Image: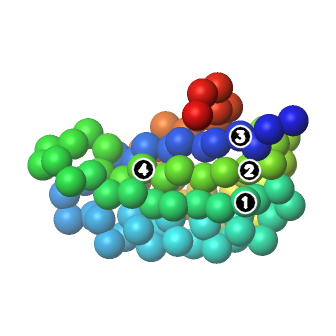
Amino acid sequence: MSDVVLINSFEVAPGDEAAAIAYWERAADHLRRQPGFVETKLHRAVAPGARFLLVNVATWRSAEAFRAATSDPAFRALVGPEMGRFPHHPGLYEVIRN
């Protein structure tokens, strides 16, 4: 089975960029230690007025590994308080062309 790719776009209100990046870093630090994690990169929009200021692209060994890591109560407690502050739109994808 091939790795899966998480693409997670974040809506960030003006003035909240630093807090959103700190939120992402806390989550990423936790997820990096989970089974099945491969890598993650956070991207920032360069076009003014982009709907999604930040986009996370991560690779996991499987969808099951990602789901297990993000359903873990410790992860939920870590990210839960600010989930509503930074609306995000995660999706898992598989590579079908190179």
Q: Is the Cβ of the residue at disc 3 closer than 8 Å to that at disc 2?
A: yes
Query: How many angstroms separate mark 1 from mark 3 (CA)?
Result: 10 Å
Q: Quadrant of residue 97?
A: top right
- How was this image coloured? rainbow
- Identify the mark nearer the N-term, 1 or 3: 3
Which numbered disc covers residue 60?
A: 2
Q: Which residue is mark 1?
A: 38
In percent of the image, x 87 and y 35: which residue is there? 1
- Identify the mark nearer the N-term, 2 or 1: 1
Q: Is residue 97 visible?
A: yes
x%, y% of residue 63? Answer: 78, 39
- Is 22 above or below relative to 36? below
Q: Is the Cβ of the residue at disc 4 closer than 8 Å to that at disc 3?
A: no
Q: Which residue is mark 3?
A: 4
Which numbered disc covers residue 55?
A: 4
- Identify the mark nearer the N-term, 4 or 2: 4
Q: Secondary structure at mark 2?
A: strand
